[in-house]
Amino acid sequence: MHGFKQILAGRLTKWVPVLAAVALLMPGAALAQLRIDITQGTIEPLPLAVTDFVGSDAAATETGDKMAGVIRSNLERSGLFRPLSEAAFIEKITDPNSAPRFGDWRIIDAQALLTGSVTQEPDGRLRVEFRLWDVFGEEQLIGLQYFTKPDNWRRVSHIISDAIYERLTGETGYFDTRIVFVSETGTKGQRVKRLALMDQDGHNPRFLTNGGALVLTPRFSPTNQEITYLSYAGGSPRVYLFNIETRQQEVVGEFPGMTFAPRFSPDGDKVIMSLQRGGNANIYELDLRTRGTRRLTNSPSIDTSPTYGPAGREIAFESDRGGTQQIYVMNSNGSGVRRISFGEGRYSTPVWSPRGDMIAFTKQYKARFLIGVMRPDGTGERILTEGYHNEGPTWAPNGRVLMFFRETPGVRGGPSLWSVDLTGYNERQVVTPGFGSDPAWSPLIR
């Protein structure tokens, strides 16, 4: 599909593949400075009002109502915003292009106000407009107009949510993203595991594999179009590449012994993984262009779960070379190995933040499984959540939220997906069809 130019705040910024966006500014209006400081610890959610989008006809009105609902849900789930009840609204917005009666919104303590409209164009496209207002400053914060196909309404809702998040926090949003995970069905001893893909809020789930073979550890490429995963098709573990758009898959390579935890490099040209050869497991790098492999560690221990830093210059991994599972960091060529975890318990599944400032991990301590973060030098360890069995953290592309899976005990127990932000206070379950494990968060779709 051909892209359209996006114009934001009056200047050309980038290409967007499914829609066009044009800035909407009130004549003579200055941009206000309402902002949430999310670098603090505990943040009181900002109260804001999200009105239903005004529709040009009955169908557009229905779409507008659904879009407003998705935006409210996205912002509320972030933990940074508190959408106010529509029952408290005094003013009914009928013309989103006119300034609202700010006094009516101050009475109900709304600090920000979102208004919008959905119009059916003669060519069949939707024109979606929104304006975000600073209620106490009585100024427009941002306004954008989108043209898109009607079935893109949910994605436009996520893009609008990202625009609001970015304008009010100064940080890039994460709502226009997808999650790949392992969907599990059946009894606990006979689980069918299939690759599944969904929006970050749990909507639009679809299966990528048919469940005929066990699948594990799916991971997105930086381009967002490919997934690498481990499959036992044919009886032995192989690393596969799956193209989301074409649904074509290919074997990355044939490796003797067991293969574990494949993950892309930041440039998408390599896959790093753990290969078991001669009774121990070491870290190998596979060049996807030449299909040549390079061994990065050489120890009699188990080295696994490698993850690149966002610049591609360093690699974190777990190893029992010191006697227990711990996290190590090395240069991307395998040199300079140093241990960074020194707390009590066993550490595993390190994942580098897209921002480069943190490494997330799973920690097992006193029969509890904890999800935490630490700096790349091992300092600043913080536990975000704990439970019976938590595992497999993955970062949102803005580095502010983690998703992981939590296993529940008993014969009827199973894994489910959860998210938690860096404060550790905003923990929420992500609904999936059936059980879900091993999530991986995509980059922004763009």
Image (spheres, rainbow, N blue to C red):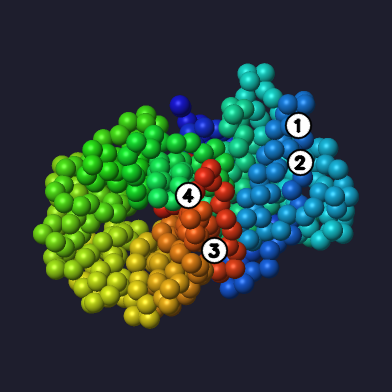
- Quadrant of res 375: bottom left
Identity of the residue drawn at 76% across and 41% down: 52
Task: Report the Cα–Cα distance between label 4 and label 1.
Answer: 35 Å
Label 1 close to label 3 by CB (< 8 Å)? no
Look at label 2 and name its amino acid: Asp
Please state the horizontal and vertical placement of residue 23, each as a whole percent of the image. 63, 41
Residue identifier under label 4: 436
Q: Which residue is mark 3?
A: 421
Which type of secondary structure does the marked residue at label 3 adopt?
strand
Instruction: Report the residue that reaches farthest toward the top.
Output: 122
Packing grade of label 3 (10 A; few <14, some 14-19, many >=20) is: many
In the image, 205 versus 220, the foreground residue is 205
The tag earlier along the polypeptide, 2 or 3, is 2
Quick one: 421 or 240, which is closer to the camera? 240
Which residue is label 1 attached to?
61
Give me the C-alpha separation between circle 1 and circle 3.
34 Å
- Numbered disc 4: secondary structure: strand
Label 4, label 3: how far apart the Cα atoms are: 20 Å
Q: x and y percent of residue 217 in the render? A: 35, 50
Mark 2 vs mark 4: which is more N-terminal? 2
- Which numbered mark, 4 or 1, is in the foreground of this view? 4
First of labels 4, 3 by sequence position: 3
Which amino acid, mark 1?
Thr
What residue sits 85% from the left and 53% below the top? 88
* Label located before the other in sequence (1 or 3): 1
Structural distance between the alpha carbons of marks 2 and 3: 28 Å
Q: Which residue is mark 2?
A: 52
